[in-house]
Image: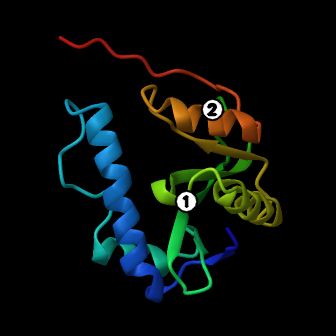
Amino acid sequence: MECAIRKAGPQDEEGVMRLLSQIAGHHHKGRPDMFKSGARKYGHEEFAAILNDLSKPVFVAVDDAGRVLGYVFCEITQDKDHPVLTDKKTLFIDDFCVDETARGQLIGSKLFEAVKTYAQSAGARHINLNVWEFNTGAIRFYEKLGFTTQRRRMEMTL
């Protein structure tokens, strides 16, 4: 499927909200003990605020009709003068979603290449993200892109 990758704008809100709901449903299905049904990570006001924050770029993949097929929410962070960590700039992928009806068509790979190019141009040395263990499809995708496990966060359910 042909798509264009660009920074998100206000015109993408409806499509991004649709995908935020889609991924929230996936998370609820995988961990109903952790994720609420019918919820979204960001609402309309939060999305508008993020679009105005230069340190939090959002990239979208759109088809010829402007329909949002995927998104990546990013954040540039910087460790400086930390007592233990080296000074570095990092791009954190806060949220990544490709429409479930458009998966397997390299849309996610194209989105990631745009993010990687942006991270390099911003002077980032690393790209980090979090992924839930139940999300095995996402884990395989990230591994194909070259991500490796940096650390683990473990839990014990009581």
Mark drawn on residue 102 = 1
Viewport quadrant of the N terminus: bottom right
Asked whether residue 9 is in view, the answer is: yes
Q: Closer to the camera, 88 or 144?
A: 144
Residue 26 image offset from top left, x and y in percent: 34, 44
Q: Residue at x 28, y 31 (%)?
A: 31
Q: Residue at x 80, y 60 (%)?
A: 123
Residue 74 sits above or below residue 17 on the image = above
Residue 36 image offset from top left, x and y in percent: 18, 44
Callout 2: helix, strand or loop?
Answer: helix
Asked whether residue 99 is in view, the answer is: no
Please tell me how crowded label 2 is: few (under 14), some (14-19), or many (20+) other residues with Cα within 10 Å.
few
Q: Amino acid at mark 1?
A: Ala
Q: Quadrant of residue 14?
A: bottom left
Q: Residue at x 53, y 68 (%)?
A: 69
Is 92 situated left or right of 30 in this image?
A: right
Residue 37 image offset from top left, x and y in percent: 17, 47
Q: Amino acid at mark 2?
A: Arg
Task: Tell which tag, 1 or 2, sits nearer the viewer.
Answer: 1
Question: Which color scheme does this rendered protein use?
Answer: rainbow
Residue 66 image offset from top left, x and y in percent: 54, 85
Residue highlighted by disc 2: 140
Marks 1 & 2, CB-CB < 8 Å contact: no
Task: Say which label, 1 or 2, has the lower sequence index.
Answer: 1
Mark drawn on residue 43 = none
Is 82 situated left or right of 152 in this image?
A: right
Callout 1: helix, strand or loop?
Answer: helix
Residue 42 sits above or below residue 27 on the image = below
Q: Gap in Å between the C-alphas at discs 1 and 2? A: 17 Å
Q: Closer to the camera, 90 or 158?
A: 158
